[in-house]
C-alpha cells in the first residue's frame, strides 16, 4: 500500500494532475452508481420522471469519460510516467470505459422503465430485478471502494461475486421463461424486464473488469480472462 | 584469476536468455576514492550482445562502476578497486594484463565527443595502427570505411576524410568517436552519457546506432535520461548510493520494478 501514495512526486504539478485524474474517476464512479440506483428505482416504482432524469444525466457520464481520457493522454504525453504512475493511468483509462458502459446500461434500464410505465407494468420479474439489482449495486460500490483504497485483495473478493450474479440471472431467466410459456400474452412486457435483468448482469461484468484493473494497478499483474481462483493465486503470489 | 560462479547474477530466468553467456562479470566490486567507498560491493554480469543501461541519481556510482569495466579508474589517483572483473573469464585486473589491449577490447565513448585534433580518417585509423590491426594502407582504408559505415557516418564524411574531426557537428563527432571505438574490433562498448550534449535528432541517430551495434557487441550505457534507458536497453540496472539496487529486464523495471527505491526514482518521487 505504501507504494501507492500518488503524491510525493518531485513535481507538485504532476501530483496535482494525478490527483485530479483520480478525483474525477471517483466522481464518475459515484455518478454511475447513482445512475444504476435511480434506474432500478424508476423501474421498480414506475417513476417516469426519475427515468427521464437518468437519461439526461447520461450525457454527464459521457462527458466525464472524455474528460478523464483526455487528462490521461495529456499526462502520458507530457510526463512519460512509469511504473505505478503508468499503471494508474492505464487502469483509470480502462475503468472509465467500463463506467461509461455501466452508464449506458443504466440508460437502457431507464428506457425500459419508461416503456413499462406506459404499458402499465409487467406481471412478473420485479422481485428478481430488485434482488439482482441490489446485488449488482453492492458489487459496484465495493469495486469502486477497492479502487479508492488500492486494495487488490478486496478487488479479487468482489470479482468473485460476479459468478453469484450470473447464477441469479440464469435462475431468474428460467422462471420468467416459464411464466411467459404459461401466459403468452405477457411476453412483450416480461421481455422488457428480461432486458433489464440482462443490463444488470452486464453491470456486474463491468464491475468485475474494474476489479481486474485494480489488481493490475496494485500488483502489476494481468488477471483478465482467468477464473477467480487463478486470480486469487496470482494476487497472493510474489509481487 | 578467480572462477566465476555459475549462477548469473541479475539474469531473468527465461529460457531464451539463460542461453546467452556473460561477456563480463563483476563480483564483489568495491571502489574507494581514498577512504570514501563509492561502490559498495556490486555483482553484475554483462551478457553477450545485450544493451544494459545503468541509471540512478547523481553520485550513485554508476559512472564509477562503468569505468571499472575497462580500468579507466586506474588513471585516477587515490582510486582503489577491490573484487574481480572478468572479460570472457579473464581477470582484467591481473597485473600481467596489457591495459592498452584491454581498452581496445572494452572501448569507451564519453559524455562530450572528444575527437583527436586530427583528420576524420586519422581519428578512426589511429587505434588500428597502434594495435597493428592493419597490414597496409588498403587494409587500413577498409577498416576506416567499415567503422564509419557501422557508425552511420560514412555517407556524411566520405568526401572530406582529410578534414579535421573537430569540424563536425556534435552528433557527428559523437558518431566519429563510436567509429573510433569500433575500429579496433572491441567486444564491449561502454558509453558514459553519450547523448547528453546532443540534440534530439542526433540523440535518435545514436540510439538507432546502439540498437544496430548490439548485434555485434555488448553495450553498457550510463544515462540520466530514463526514457533513453527505456528506449535502448534490454536490461536496466538501478544504482543508489554505491549499491546495485535492482537489475531486471527494462520493460519490467519501467512497468513494475521490484524495489521501492527503483520505483521512487523512475516515477520522480525522489528526495
Image: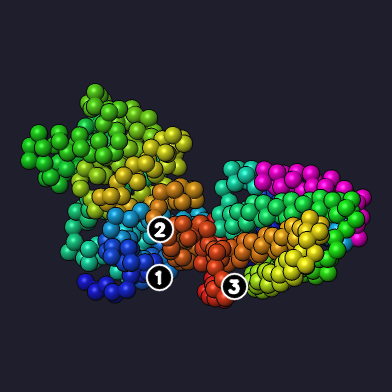
Q: Chain of mark 2?
A: B
Label 3 neighbourhood size at 10 Å, few (<14), some (14-19), many (20+)? Answer: some
In three-dimensional space, the C-alpha distance between marks 3 and 2, rounded to whole angstroms, equals 33 Å
Q: Which residues are magenta?
A: A45-70
CA distance separating discs 1 and 3: 44 Å
Residue A24's spot in the image, x, y percent?
75, 51
The residue that mark 3 highlights is A228
Secondary-structure class at tag 2:
strand
CB-based contact (under 8 Å), mark 1 and mark 3: no
Pointer 2: what residue? Answer: B235
Q: Secondary structure at mark 3?
A: helix
Q: Is residue A37 above or below residue A17?
A: below
Q: Nearer the viewer, residue B3 or B215?
A: B215
The residue identified by callout 1 is B41
How far from the left and from the top, in percent, is residue B65? 38, 60
Indicate the secondary structure of the residue bearing disc 1: strand
Name the residue located 43 percent from the left edge and 69 percent from the top edge.
B40
Question: In the rendered view, does A222 fall on the left or right side of B91?
Answer: right
Q: Position of residue B165 (x, y in %)?
A: 29, 31
Amino acid at each position: 500500500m505504501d507504494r501507492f501514495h500518488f503524491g510525493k512526486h518531485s513535481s507538485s504539478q504532476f501530483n496535482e494532475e494525478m490527483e485530479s485524474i483520480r478525483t474525477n474517476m471517483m466522481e464518475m464512479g459515484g455518478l454511475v452508481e447513482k445512475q444504476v440506483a435511480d434506474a432500478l428505482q424508476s423501474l421498480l416504482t414506475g417513476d417516469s420522471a426519475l427515468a427521464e432524469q437518468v437519461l439526461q444525466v447520461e450525457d454527464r457520464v459521457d462527458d466525464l469519460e472524455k474528460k478523464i481520457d483526455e487528462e490521461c493522454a495529456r499526462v502520458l504525453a507530457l510526463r512519460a510516467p512509469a511504473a505505478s504512475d503508468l499503471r494508474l493511468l492505464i487502469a483509470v483509462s480502462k475503468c472509465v470505459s467500463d463506467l461509461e458502459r455501466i452508464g449506458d446500461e443504466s440508460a437502457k434500464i431507464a428506457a425500459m422503465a419508461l416503456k413499462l410505465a406506459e404499458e402499465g407494468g409487467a406481471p412478473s420479474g420485479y422481485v428478481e430485478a430488485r434482488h439482482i439489482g441490489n446485488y449488482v449495486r453492492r458489487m459496484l460500490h465495493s469495486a469502486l471502494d477497492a479502487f479508492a483504497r488500492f486494495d487488490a485483495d478486496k478487488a479479487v473478493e468482489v470479482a468473485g461475486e460476479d459468478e453469484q450474479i450470473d447464477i441469479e440471472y440464469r435462475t431468474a431467466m428460467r422462471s420468467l421463461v416459464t411464466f411467459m410459456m404459461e401466459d403468452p400474452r405477457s411476453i412483450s412486457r416480461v421481455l422488457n424486464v428480461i432486458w433489464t435483468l440482462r443490463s444488470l448482469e452486464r453491470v456486474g461484468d463491468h464491475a468485475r473488469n474494474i476489479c481486474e484493473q485494480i489488481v493490475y494497478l496494485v500488483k502489476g499483474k494481468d488477471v483478465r480472462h482467468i477464473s477467480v481462483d487463478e486470480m486469487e493465486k496470482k494476487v497472493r503470489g510474489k509481487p | 584469476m578467480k572462477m566465476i560462479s555459475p549462477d548469473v547474477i541479475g539474469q531473468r530466468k527465461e529460457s531464451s536468455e539463460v542461453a546467452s553467456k556473460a561477456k563480463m562479470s563483476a563480483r564483489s566490486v568495491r571502489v574507494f576514492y581514498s577512504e570514501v567507498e563509492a561502490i559498495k560491493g556490486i555483482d553484475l554480469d554483462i551478457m553477450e550482445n545485450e544493451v544494459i543501461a545503468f541509471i540512478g541519481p547523481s553520485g550513485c556510482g554508476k559512472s564509477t562502476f562503468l569505468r571499472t569495466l575497462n580500468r579507466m579508474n586506474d588513471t585516477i589517483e587515490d582510486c582503489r578497486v577491490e573484487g574481480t572483473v572478468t572479460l570472457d573469464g579473464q581477470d582484467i585486473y591481473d597485473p600481467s594484463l596489457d591495459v592498452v589491449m584491454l581498452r581496445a577490447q572494452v572501448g569507451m565513448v564519453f559524455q562530450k565527443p572528444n575527437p583527436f585534433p586530427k583528420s576524420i580518417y586519422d581519428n578512426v585509423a589511429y587505434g588500428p595502427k597502434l594495435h597493428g590491426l592493419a597490414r597496409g594502407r588498403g587494409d587500413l582504408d577498409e577498416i576506416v570505411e567499415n567503422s564509419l559505415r557501422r557508425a552511420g557516418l560514412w555517407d556524411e564524411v566520405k568526401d572530406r576524410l582529410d578534414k579535421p574531426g573537430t569540424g563536425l557537428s556534435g552528433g557527428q563527432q559523437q558518431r566519429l568517436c563510436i567509429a573510433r571505438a569500433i575500429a579496433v574490433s572491441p567486444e564491449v562498448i561502454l558509453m558514459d552519457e553519450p547523448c547528453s550534449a546532443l540534440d534530439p535528432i542526433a540523440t535518435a541517430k545514436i540510439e538507432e546506432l546502439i540498437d544496430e551495434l548490439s548485434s555485434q557487441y555488448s553495450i553498457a550505457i550510463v544515462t540520466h535520461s530514463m526514457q533513453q534507458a527505456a528506449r535502448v536497453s534490454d536490461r536496466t540496472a538501478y544504482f543508489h548510493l554505491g549499491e546495485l539496487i535492482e537489475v531486471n529486464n527494462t520493460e519490467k523495471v519501467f512497468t513494475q520494478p521490484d524495489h521501492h527505491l527503483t520505483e521512487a526514482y523512475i516515477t520522480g518521487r525522489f528526495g
